[in-house]
């Protein structure tokens, strides 16, 4: 039998004590059972259930499969979507049994993917009141609405899901293998960017501060689902510094910043990527460690069978409708050399390459026209297209389709039309036009470097909605009542690019 010297004994005791001290201070250690871990699988701004870039990226069935894998790693795993999913999408514009789908396909796929929590995005409120209420009732996941409320009968009240009020916050209680649990508060904060008559918002920052203070004593820490611009997330972190993690949306591009002690992250739109946030909390030391991994959602991840079947069902519905309309969704059209910017924040405020492409395609459909002009509200992609694009991508970009028209009018009406577009900056009434049309303060509007003459006649191509007079500041642009709008022509031939703006774009790209 070996014997330790006294000095060796005391060294041995010291090392044990030191190791014990170190493990209690390190939240990654689980020696005493005080460590609780949870995982958030975080996506945002998802409009396409079946993926993008020809299916190369995204797909909610892949996201669902990733959740299953993470659940094996940690049973305390939650799948969250930080706003914008009911609209826009080309599928949502289709009709089923005479009724527009309006996001029904998204709820169906999200239910199948086992989404846990969502918050509202601004695009949820593109839908009509009854459609929003129907989609909420169809959902099997929880909506968190900290600052978003329903306005009905002159009363501000919570939205409801099957008669139950949507919570202003949630508390979850993940447990470790020893049975010890923690309480985590979750807020849901939405930008006030889009407010139809049936919606009311409270101030994002003060409401978040008030609610987080109310639940502070009930929870170990609080996180938030946010649908805000990045600078607004930064402001929120400044006003409510006790928020540990902001799982954001609205910006469409992946990013990760630290503001003070708050981490903010966003994934790429349409689940091209997802963030995996692994949180480790030490109940004894109150320390929280957050490890955030950006994960590409591509063919390296399989498809969860139930969600895959739901997506295939909706794809079949869409294909049958598009085939009747003369489209082949999977057909490859053009390999983009640079991203095509159809994001709402840009195309409704500036000329973009997506807008230029579309108006050039419109002009191509009417070779004798002098200028083509587009109402940017016709572009509903709110995303960027990259790489090889298909006919389905064109359908996504211009989901409402519609005829394009050539007409003649005076330079005065043309100038009024263009000036109205400037007034509509920030809305769908902002105009996109060909590069040969320019404006400067000294010369006003010029076409091919020549000042537009008020008494001269011009041949113009535009989308159908711009000739209804219903656009903001454009009541005079009604082809049925304005006698200065003459020689209006289009085509009813289903194969003609004049019959559908999407076909005009496809024909033009194939020509290129």
Image (tube, rainbow, N blue to C red):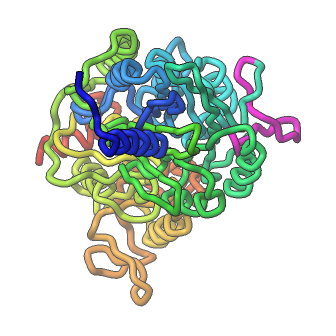
Residue projecting furthest to the right: 154
Residue 340, position as x, y percentages in the image: 27, 51
Q: Is residue 273 visible?
A: yes
Residue projecting furthest to the bottom: 442
In the rendered image, the vertical position of residue 441 relative to residue 228, given as above or below = below
**In the image: residue 349, left or right of residue 145:** left
Q: Quadrant of residue 64?
A: top left
Residue 100, position as x, y percentages in the image: 53, 23
Q: Quadrant of residue 452?
A: bottom left
Residue projecting furthest to the left: 512
Q: Is residue 157 magenta?
A: yes
Residue 443, position as x, y percentages in the image: 39, 86
Q: Is residue 292 visible?
A: no
Which residue is rendered at x = 41% and y = 45% of the image?
A: 18
In the rendered image, the vertical position of residue 335 relative to residue 308, given as above or below = below
Of 510 and 369, the residue lying toward us: 510
Q: Which residues are magenta?
A: 145-162
Which residue is rendered at x = 54% and y = 57% of the image?
A: 233
**In the image: residue 221, left or right of residue 353:** right
In the rendered image, the vertical position of residue 231 relative to residue 146, given as above or below = below
Which residue is rendered at x = 33% and y = 34% of the image?
A: 395
Residue 397, position as x, y percentages in the image: 35, 41
- Quadrant placement of the N terminus: top left
Q: Is residue 108 magenta?
A: no
Of 242 and 103, the residue lying toward us: 242
Which residue is rendered at x = 52% and y = 47% of the image?
A: 245
Q: Quadrant of residue 169?
A: top right
Numbered circles on residues, count: 0
């Amino acid at each position: 039998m070996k014997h330790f010297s006294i000095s060796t004994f005391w060294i041995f005791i010291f090392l044990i004590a030191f190791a014990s001290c170190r493990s209690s201070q390190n939240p990654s250690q689980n020696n005493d059972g005080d460590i609780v871990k949870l995982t958030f699988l975080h996506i945002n701004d998802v409009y396409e259930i079946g993926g993008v870039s020809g299916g190369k990226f995204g797909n909610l069935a892949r996201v669902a499969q990733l959740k299953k894998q993470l659940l094996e790693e940690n049973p305390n795993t939650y799948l969250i979507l930080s706003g914008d999913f009911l609209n826009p999408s080309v599928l949502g514009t289709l009709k089923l049994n005479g009724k527009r789908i309006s996001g029904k396909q998204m709820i169906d796929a999200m239910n199948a993917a086992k989404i846990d929590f969502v918050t509202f995005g601004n695009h949820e409120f593109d839908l009509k009141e009854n459609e929003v209420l129907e989609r909420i009732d169809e959902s099997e996941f929880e909506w968190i609405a900290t600052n978003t409320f329903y306005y009905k009968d002159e009363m501000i009240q919570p939205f409801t899901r099957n008669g139950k009020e949507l919570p202003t916050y949630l508390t979850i209680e993940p447990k470790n293998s020893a049975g010890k649990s923690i309480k985590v508060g979750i807020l849901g904060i939405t930008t006030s960017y889009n407010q139809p008559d049936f919606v009311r918002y409270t101030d994002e920052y003060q409401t978040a501060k008030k609610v987080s203070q109310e639940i502070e004593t009930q929870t170990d820490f609080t996180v938030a689902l946010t649908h805000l611009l990045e600078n607004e997330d930064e402001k929120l972190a400044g006003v409510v510094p006790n928020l540990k993690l902001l799982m954001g949306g609205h910006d469409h591009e992946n990013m990760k910043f630290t503001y003070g002690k708050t981490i903010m992250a966003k994934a790429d739109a349409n689940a091209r990527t997802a963030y995996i946030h692994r949180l480790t909390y030490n109940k004894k030391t109150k320390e929280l460690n957050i490890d955030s991994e950006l994960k590409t959602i591509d063919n390296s991840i399989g498809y969860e069978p139930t969600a895959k079947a739901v997506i295939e069902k909706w794809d079949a519905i869409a294909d049958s409708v598009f085939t009747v309309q003369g489209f082949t969704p999977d057909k490859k059209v053009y390999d983009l050399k640079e991203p095509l910017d159809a994001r709402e924040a840009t195309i409704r405020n500036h000329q973009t390459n997506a807008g230029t492409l579309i108006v050039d395609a419109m002009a191509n459909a009417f070779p004798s026209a002098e200028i083509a002009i587009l109402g940017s509200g016709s572009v509903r992609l709110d995303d960027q297209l990259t790489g090889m694009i298909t006919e389905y991508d064109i359908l996504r970009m211009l989901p409402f389709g519609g005829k394009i028209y050539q007409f003649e009018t005076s330079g005065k009406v043309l100038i009024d039309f263009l000036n109205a577009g400037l007034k509509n900056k920030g809305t769908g009434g902002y105009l996109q036009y060909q590069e040969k049309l320019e404006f400067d303060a000294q010369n006003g509007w010029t076409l091919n470097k020549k000042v537009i003459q008020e008494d001269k006649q011009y041949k113009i191509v535009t989308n159908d909605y711009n000739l209804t007079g219903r656009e903001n500041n454009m009541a005079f642009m009604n082809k049925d009542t304005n006698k200065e709008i003459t020689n209006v022509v289009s085509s009813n031939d289903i194969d003609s690019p004049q019959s559908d703006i999407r076909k005009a774009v496809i024909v033009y790209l194939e020509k290129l």
